[in-house]
Amino acid sequence: MNLDSAKNAVEFCLVRARDDQGRPTDILVPGHDMARYAMNITRLENGTIYQCGCLRIAEDGLCEKACPGNSNGKVCYHVLAGLMYAVRGIGHLEFFESLETPLVLQEMGRKVITIKAGGGGGVLYAVFFKYRKKKRKVPVQQCIVPQGLGPYDPAIRA
């Protein structure tokens, strides 16, 4: 799992298509050597399983071939970057290679997502952490203490 490359690519992602609820389904992700990849998300079973494909885009704009990193039992960093970009602003994802830790977090009320590679059979698990809405700050009214009260009263010092 190449999280460092995914984190570097997140800021350059671009959403190409959204579903009827406004969630990204097709995201352009940059790759090495000026390559571009089209990452697509298919949500299954009420959003707990994501089937993610990744295709390299040729210079003429047509999808050329499947990403080699999204095969052989692996999930490529383009998919990770696309998923991180999809939840940006509403929360963040933590990725895991085994199901042990996500199940513990699920018992604590977190949502566990199974991520399946489109062509290679690779599986990762992610836990979604939703950002809390910031509470509106209420200004504190200034407390006016009458003179002559407290430890700094000149009459008490004398």
Image (tube, rainbow, N blue to C red):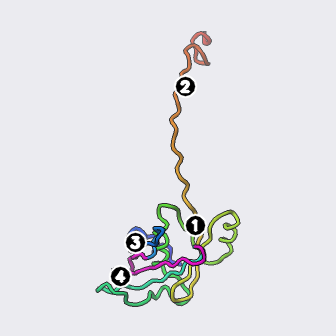
Range covered by the magenta-colored residues: 26-46
* Magenta highlight on residue 155: no
By secondary structure, the bulk of the magenta-drawn segment is best described as strand
Q: Earlier in the sequence, mark 1 or mark 4?
A: 4
Q: Where residue 7 appears, x then y in whole percent? A: 46, 70
> Does dot 2 land on a helix, a strand or a loop?
loop
Q: Is residue 99 left or right of residue 70?
A: right
Q: Residue at x 60, y 16 (%)?
A: 149
Q: Residue at x 69, y 63 (%)?
A: 108
Marks 1 and 2 close (CB-CB < 8 Å) = no
For the residue marked with disc 3, what is the amino acid? Val
Q: Where residue 25 appears, x then y in whole percent? A: 46, 75
> Does dot 1 land on a helix, a strand or a loop?
strand
Q: Where residue 72 appears, x then y in whole percent? A: 54, 90
Q: Is residue 124 left or right of residue 55?
A: right
Give the CA separation, mark 4 to mark 3: 17 Å
Give the CA separation, mark 3 to mark 1: 20 Å
Marks 1 and 4 close (CB-CB < 8 Å) = no
The relative height of residue 34 versus residue 142 in the rendered view (above or below) is: below
Q: Is residue 22 left or right of residue 59?
A: right
Dividing the picture into quadrants, the one containing residue 94 is bottom right
Residue corresponding to mark 2 = 143
Give the CA separation, mark 2 to mark 4: 62 Å
Single out the mark in the foreground, 3 or 1. Answer: 3
Q: Earlier in the sequence, mark 4 or mark 3?
A: 3
Which labelled disc corresponds to residue 35? Answer: 4
Single out the mark in the foreground, 4 or 3. Answer: 3
Residue corresponding to mark 1 = 128
Residue corresponding to mark 3 = 15
Can residue 114 be seen here?
no
Single out the mark in the foreground, 3 or 2. Answer: 3
